[in-house]
Image (tube, grey):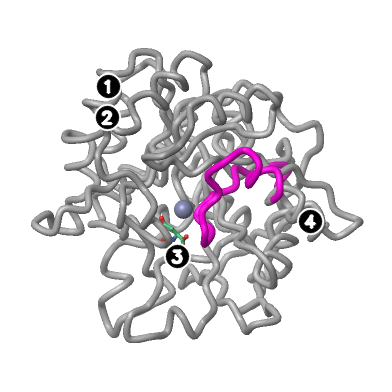
Amino acid sequence: MTQNLTIARPDDWHLHLRDGAMLEAVLPETARHFGRAIIMPNLVPPVVTGAQAAAYKDRIMAALPEDMQFEPLMTLYLTEDSDPEDIAAAHASGLIKSVKLYPAGATTNSASGVSDFKNVRAALDKMAEIGLPLCVHGEVTDHDIDIFDREAVFIDRVLDPIRKATPGLRVVMEHITTKDGVAYVRDNARDLGATITTHHLIINRNHILVGGIKPHYYCLPVAKREEHRLALREAATSGDARFFLGTDSAPHLDGDKESACGCAGCFTATNTMALLAHVFEEDGKLENLEAFASRNGPGFYGLPVNDGTITLTKNEQATVFPDKIESANGPVTVFDPGYDVFWTVAD
Ligand code: DOR
Ligand code: ZN
């Protein structure tokens, strides 16, 4: 028996589209199902100024197939040289919806990120003043901190002090991976939200390492223990308005992942909505999928929920997703949950 679920068209509140040939290849995968996405600025060189964000937005719109509708919500990459007035102007014009904080060296293309937080004080104060959210990659980069502890330590050492020093600053904790992240959001009612990825609801650290190393499950922040995955599942499926979908779909060419020094990132744009329907159904919370994927994000950002809808269908046959999508420079592997999924997005 088929089962249908129609929800408001979802948005992706954390997405990597890249540029050039990769942008051309991956953009339709997101635009097929999603109305809007917060576009990560970690290009090389990064998208730091309003002018760079406007040019990047133009490239995204030029790559969008004519029969598709999609709105990229642009972000600026915060550096120690970012100009608060340029940030404010890009916000006032409606071009950008947030500024992204990468601690220097935390992840892919984060070398231009922040080392000394007092050097971004003026930018943060300006953002608090104008109500522009800060999206945070929440991991410390200290060599003596174990990679599995870097999110929890970031909350104590960096995030909480920044929030206390900047009253009114609205913060999105991006791609939380721990029960500590969930608890921090729950304990701090004001001005705080968190995105959760599809893959962190599905894999724990064993999936990466047991039975041979699985480069396509490696991302940052790295997946943690099972107890953390379960905390994320509970938060995402709860309907709590502070948790919303940010896939962090992050394409890399297969050759760059299947390597002695493989890149971080899971590419989930193609099958995210079907996988989420599976996850929410498994937890008996299908009725909250719309809140997580379509309503809570616009609520946080003060934007309207999308007008359109998508319909998810559960079939008797397992859905066949493509293993890879092709770009002009080579293939990109689509995230494989490791089990059959019977949901699909109806065309
Ligand atoms: O896994 C990740 N990939 N995490 C990030 O923070 C960056 C991203 C990328 O750009 O590839
Ligand atoms: Zn990301």
- Residue in the image at 41% along x and 28% along y: 171
Foreground pick, 327 / 32: 327
Q: Quadrant of residue 172?
A: top left
Q: Earlier in the sequence, mark 2 or mark 3?
A: 2
Q: Earlier in the sequence, mark 2 or mark 4?
A: 2
Residue type at tag 4: Ala
- Residue in the image at 27% along x and 22% along y: 187
Foreground pick, 123 / 183: 123
Residue type at tag 1: Asp
Label at residue 265? 3
Residue 311, given in percent of the width and then of the height, sits at 76, 47
C-alpha span from label 3 to label 4: 27 Å
C-alpha span from label 1 to label 3: 29 Å
Identity of the residue furthest to the right in this view: 67
In magenta stretch: residue 38: yes
The answer to whether mark 1 and mark 3 are in CB contact below 8 A is: no
Q: Earlier in the sequence, mark 3 or mark 4?
A: 3
- Residue in the image at 30% along x and 33% along y: 119
Residue 333, given in percent of the width and then of the height, sits at 55, 77
C-alpha span from label 1 to label 4: 39 Å
Mark 3 or mark 4, which is nearer to you? 3
Residue type at tag 3: Gly
Q: In this picture, is 183 found above or below 2?
A: above
Which residue is denoted by mark 4 in the rendering? Answer: 346
The answer to whether mark 1 and mark 4 are in CB contact below 8 A is: no
Label at residue 223? none
CB of mark 3 near ligand 1 (< 8 Å): yes
- Mark 2, secondary structure of its residue: helix
Point out the stretch of residues depicted in magenta: 34-55
Mark 1 or mark 3, which is nearer to you? 3
Q: Earlier in the sequence, mark 1 or mark 4?
A: 1
